[in-house]
Image: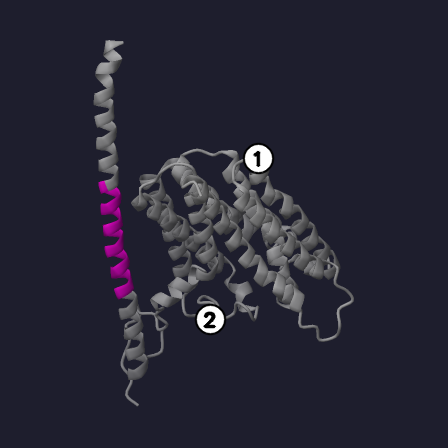
Amino acid sequence: MTPPLTPSELAAFRARQKSRSRALALVLVALVVLFFGITLVKIRDGAAARHQAVLAAPATQAQ
Amino acid sequence: MPQLPLSPTVEPASAEWRDFFALTKPRVMTLVIFTGLCGLLAAPGEIHPMLAFTAILCIAVGAGGAAALNMWWEADLDAGMKRTRHRPVPSGRIDRTAARDFGVALSCGSVITMALAIGWLDAGILALSIFYYAWVYTVWLKPRTPQNIVIGGGAGAFPPLIGWIAVTGHITLMPVLLFLIIFVWTPPHFWALALFVQIDYAKVGIPMMPVVAGERSTRHQILGYAVVLLPLTLLPWWLGFTGAIFGLSALALGLVFVGLSAQVGLRRPLPDKDTMKPEKRLFGYSILYLFVLFGMLVVDHLAARFGA
């Protein structure tokens, strides 16, 4: 069993916990932004590839 | 003094975010990010800035995960060495399980993100680099052989390879040469450090080269690797992968590296209470050397691309 903490130790403990929670929240928000950005780029690249395929299709058929 | 009861589920030494950040070895990560970025910027082809950023982030986070796993495994050894005993795990700021879980989370997260955003080849090489550092080097080689840093040095050589492949999507000779340059650079860089901290390594029973083969042999090997490194760094120029900017920079930087290594390699007998100045100078220069060499690779590439 952990020995009880004095009020000042408890306050320091809570401050450390709080700083860690804030950092974790920031990381999670950053991950959301990152995956949103990656998704946009992937969708754009996918659309561009499909557009190229459509343009190339009639030329292939004509041959 | 009044004391407040604490829930038994709460650990008294709750770690700060800085302690977790320290687990990732941020100083080592600087070099990893830089060489990875240089590999990415020097590669032929285009990559969207968002994906480039993601690739570098994955390299950095993967390296951080491997470093956390290294600190988890070596907590007992770190506690016995002056240089490392203040790290978060041996000092008690983070418990071992948390360090292990943190390392696993970063490693898996970086590999999965790399696979989804960049590709499976890059993700596979990133996973290999993490496994190489966390298991091949840390668990297997380091406690067993004085050649640990020679073979284990491969772990730090992966970033430019991963950065390059993020752009091209396949492996060619040039990124393999970049891998080999860091691979051969690692032993003289690390043994220079091991020479002035060898008492620490001896105390915890790690068979570093100076401890096992002796100082004289280590000094000769430092010089040997530096001599091999010089022509290796000139190979990209000779083979036509880079221009004269990189070639001449590699030549100048390499000659200084050989010169400083010769001061260490041919040094004897050592005076009493030696301050190991040449060894410390070589260690410092070796870091600068790699930064400038890879920086010049990018400058050379940009000069060729924009017709300077």
**Would residue B168 be found to the left or right of residue A57 on screen?**
right
Tag 1, which chain? Answer: B
**Would residue B137 be found to the left or right of residue B14 on screen?**
right
- Which x, y percent locates residue B207? 65, 57
What residue is shown with label 1? B239
Q: Nearer the viewer, residue B86 or B168?
A: B168
Q: Nearer the viewer, residue B65 or B55?
A: B55
What color scheme is it? one colour
Residue A28 painted magenta: yes
Above/below status of B212 relative to B123: below
Tell me the amino acid under the disc marked 1: Leu
Find numbered disc 1 in the image and state the secondary structure of the residue it sits on. loop
What residue is shown with label 2? B91
- Which is in the foreground here, disc 1 or disc 2? 1
By secondary structure, the bulk of the magenta-drawn segment is best described as helix
**Would residue B52 be found to the left or right of residue A21 on screen?**
right
Which region shows up in magenta?
Answer: A22-40
Residue in the picture at 31% in, 41% down: B48
Residue projecting furthest to the top: A63
